[in-house]
Image (cartoon, rainbow, N blue to C red):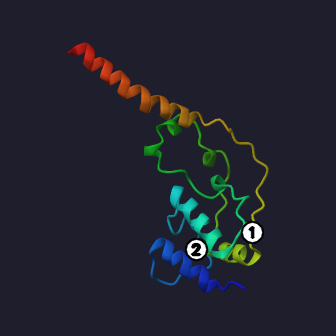
Amino acid sequence: MVEFVEIEQFVQEQTGRKRPLAASLRLEEDLDITGDDYFELVDDFSHRFDVNTEHFLWYFHCKEEPLGSNLGAWFFPTPDQQVERISITLGHLHHFAQAKRWDVSYPEHNISLKRHDIKLNNALYIGLPFLLISLLWLLS
């Protein structure tokens, strides 16, 4: 049986925090774990405590990487912007570790599977340098 202190130690290792952590602390809102860091924490958690996370839906629990790295999100909503956030606490992690599964009942939802934000990013990142090189060539 997994004890809460094991969850506390795991999160302390993941975050570098030394002070005692309460079961009520929320991963994203209180501990500032978001984006890739959140996904890595859940992945490490599933391996360390042998928890089945196949039904984990990241977009309900955390934001994507900061907006500055996804310019397309200024024009098209990302998956996390299309659902209501469900906070996960250390107490939840303790429960999941004991149950050996990600035990969240997600509400019915309908998110766009087409990532127009990423398509726009790709067009900008590929097209803009090409445009600049062409412009420099024309001006030389």
Please tell me whether residue 44 is drawn above or below residue 7 in the rendered image: above
Mark 2 surroundings within 10 Å by alpha-carbon count, few (fewer than 14), some (14 through 19), many (20 or more): some
Secondary structure under tag 1 reads loop
Q: Is residue 100 left or right of residue 121?
A: right
Secondary structure under tag 2 reads loop
Mark 1 surroundings within 10 Å by alpha-carbon count, few (fewer than 14), some (14 through 19), many (20 or more): some
- Say whether residue 120 is visible: yes
In the image, what residue occupies the spot 32% across and 24% down?
132
- Say whether residue 89 is visible: no
The Cα atoms of the two marked residues, 2 and 1, are separated by: 20 Å
In the image, what residue occupies the spot 60% across and 86% down?
5
**CB-based contact (under 8 Å), mark 2 and mark 1:** no
Q: Is residue 122 left or right of residue 7?
A: left
Give the x, y percent position of residue 51.
70, 70
In the image, what residue occupies the spot 65% across and 45% down?
82
Please tell me whether residue 2 is drawn above or below residue 14 in the rendered image: below
Give the x, y percent position of residue 22.
58, 81
Residue kind at label 2, given as amino acid type: Leu
> Which quarter of the figure is the N terminus placed in?
bottom right
Residue where numbered disc 2 is placed: 25
Query: Which mark is drawn over residue 101?
Result: 1
Q: Nearer the viewer, residue 22 or 140?
A: 140
In the image, what residue occupies the spot 42% across and 33% down?
125
Q: Nearer the viewer, mark 2 or mark 1?
A: 1
Given the current orientation, which residue lies at the most extreme left position? 140
Q: Is residue 78 left or right of residue 56?
A: left
Give the x, y percent position of residue 60.
66, 55
Residue kind at label 1, given as amino acid type: Arg
| Mark positioned earlier in the residue sequence (2 or 1) | 2
> Which quarter of the figure is the C terminus placed in?
top left
